[in-house]
Image: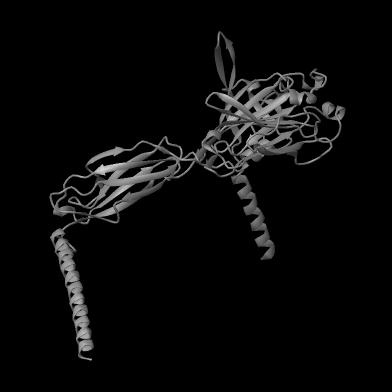
């Protein structure tokens, strides 16, 4: 039984791995300049893996745009291995690429000769993918001609791949942000690897932020290079290093970015660029800052009103939230004459925003209810708040409406009890004064007798 159990476990593990290996083919668009400011698009596809036999035929594609990707570092396969089944297919664009030196001065040491090596000759393609769960860019070096029948397809090697699994981070106001970044590199040809010193090459890492039309360099690093780099801003830190030191590659690296105590001004588009000699891989992330609102409703927990009179104004305080956009306040009535959920009637309005030192805002929503009837006794009024930082159902606070005279003391009873208590207190005080006066008189009479 033990060998059989072991065999079943191995089979189950194999089935689990085949289930979670991700998509085999990524559909893309090949984009190029068509002149006069126009772009042309052609369908393309990346075959990341295939089953036994020949690649599946794609007569709908230009063979030069049907690419079977050789991924020595395994970065692309690893990125899609745990791709959620319910996640939308990634948006993919492909274009021609010309290797060029990096433009920033602080990475000029990567290309001291300013001449592109012969190993980088030939065609290059840049692939960019984005989805809610990842963003990546990869540089492919295709072979000169498609392979022959039975399926016309072009072989291509992934040379540099840059990936993030946090393409749209949502950071709570005041919390630290950690933006994921990994990359993989393999020398484009064996000749190129032999001509270089063994071990991973030096590289440059750059993190920038773009927001409201302005760009800022937050961090620059050049592991393995000597030279001056701009100082980091806003307390940013990056974990810039190769993860391995194989002599001839492939190599994987880490460039994750840490930003402490994020504030509203720090949201925007973050661009992470990995600079290698003549290759610059870049991914983008859209960082949003959020803070969930606190919701309180007054007067609470019970609102008293007499039949035919309007209850006191309801005030819903929505406090310390961010961003201010996307906030919705709804007034609900549960119970009442119809005995079910309905939109509350009455005149409603909002106050102006109040700004706090941490960048969050607050406002108050008001509701003036119409005169009540006895049928509304026990009805519950609720203030429901919707905000991007909250679940779909939002957050709510409620109060109960009590109509005087139907349960508990009425308004008249309340007034009567107040007057009775007042008279009783006065009577007790009068008796106390009389007793004290009588005791004092007795004492004075006894002294005179003695």
Residue farthest bottom in this picture? 450
Pinpoint residue 60: horizontal percent, then vertical percent.
56, 22
- Above or below, 272 against 102 in this view is below
Rendered residue at 81%/30% (across/down): 226
In front: 97, or 145? Answer: 97
Quarter location, residue 208: top right
- Above or below, 193 against 52 in this view is above
Say if residue 392 shows up in the picture: no
Rendered residue at 18%/68% (across/down): 421
Rendered residue at 42%/34% (across/down): 325
Q: Is residue 309 left or right of residue 201?
A: left
In front: 205, or 216? Answer: 216
- Above or below, 107 against 89 in this view is above
Pinpoint residue 229: horizontal percent, then vertical percent.
74, 29
Pinpoint residue 379: horizontal percent, then vertical percent.
23, 53
In front: 266, or 142? Answer: 266
Say if residue 296 shows up in the picture: yes
Rendered residue at 29%/38% (across/down): 349
In front: 255, or 185? Answer: 255
Pinpoint residue 267: horizontal percent, then vertical percent.
54, 34
Quarter location, residue 276: top right
Picture quarter with the N terminus: bottom right
Quarter location, residue 450: bottom left
Residue farthest top in this picture? 36
């Amino acid at each position: 039984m033990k060998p059989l159990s072991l065999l079943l476990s191995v089979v189950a593990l194999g089935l689990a791995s085949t289930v979670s290996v991700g998509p085999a083919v990524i559909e893309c668009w090949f984009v190029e300049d068509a002149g006069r400011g126009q772009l042309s698009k052609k369908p393309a596809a990346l075959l990341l893996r295939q089953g036994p036999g020949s690649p599946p035929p794609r007569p709908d594609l230009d063979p030069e745009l049907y690419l079977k990707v050789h991924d020595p570092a395994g970065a692309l396969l690893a990125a899609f291995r745990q791709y959620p089944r319910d996640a939308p297919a990634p948006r993919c664009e492909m274009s021609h690429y010309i290797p060029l030196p990096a433009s920033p001065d602080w990475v000029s040491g990567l290309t001291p000769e300013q001449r592109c090596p012969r190993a980088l000759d030939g065609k290059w393609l840049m692939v960019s993918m984005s989805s809610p769960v990842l963003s990546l860019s990869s540089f492919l070096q295709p072979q000169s001609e498609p392979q022959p029948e039975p399926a016309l397809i072009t072989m291509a090697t992934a040379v540099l791949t840059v990936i993030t699994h946090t393409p749209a981070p949502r950071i709570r106001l005041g919390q630290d942000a950690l933006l994921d970044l990994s990359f993989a590199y393999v020398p484009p040809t064996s000749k190129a690897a032999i001509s270089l010193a063994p071990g991973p090459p030096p590289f440059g890492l750059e993190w920038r932020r773009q927001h409201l039309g302005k760009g800022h360099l937050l961090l620059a690093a050049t592991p393995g290079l000597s030279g001056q780099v701009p100082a980091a801003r806003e307390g940013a830190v990056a974990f810039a290093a190769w993860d391995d030191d194989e002599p001839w590659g492939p190599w994987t690296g880490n460039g994750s970015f840490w930003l402490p105590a994020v504030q509203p001004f720090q949201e925007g588009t973050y661009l992470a660029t990995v600079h290698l000699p003549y290759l610059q891989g870049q991914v983008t992330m859209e960082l949003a800052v959020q803070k969930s609102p606190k919701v309180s409703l007054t007067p609470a927990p019970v609102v008293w009103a007499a039949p035919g009179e309007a209850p006191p104004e309801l005030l819903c305080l929505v406090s310390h939230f961010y961003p201010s956009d996307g906030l919705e306040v709804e007034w609900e009535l549960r119970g009442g004459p119809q005995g079910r959920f309905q939109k509350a009637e009455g005149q409603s309005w909002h106050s102006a925003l109040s700004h706090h030192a941490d960048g969050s805002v607050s406002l108050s929503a008001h509701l003036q209810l119409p005169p009540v009837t006895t049928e509304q006794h026990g009805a519950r009024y609720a203030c429901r708040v919707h905000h991007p930082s909250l679940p779909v159902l939002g957050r709510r606070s409620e109060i109960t409406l009590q109509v005087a005279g139907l349960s508990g003391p009425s308004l008249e009873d309340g007034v009567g009890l107040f007057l009775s208590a007042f008279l009783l207190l006065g009577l007790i005080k009068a008796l106390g004064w009389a007793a004290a006066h009588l005791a004092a008189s007795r004492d004075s009479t006894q002294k005179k007798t003695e």
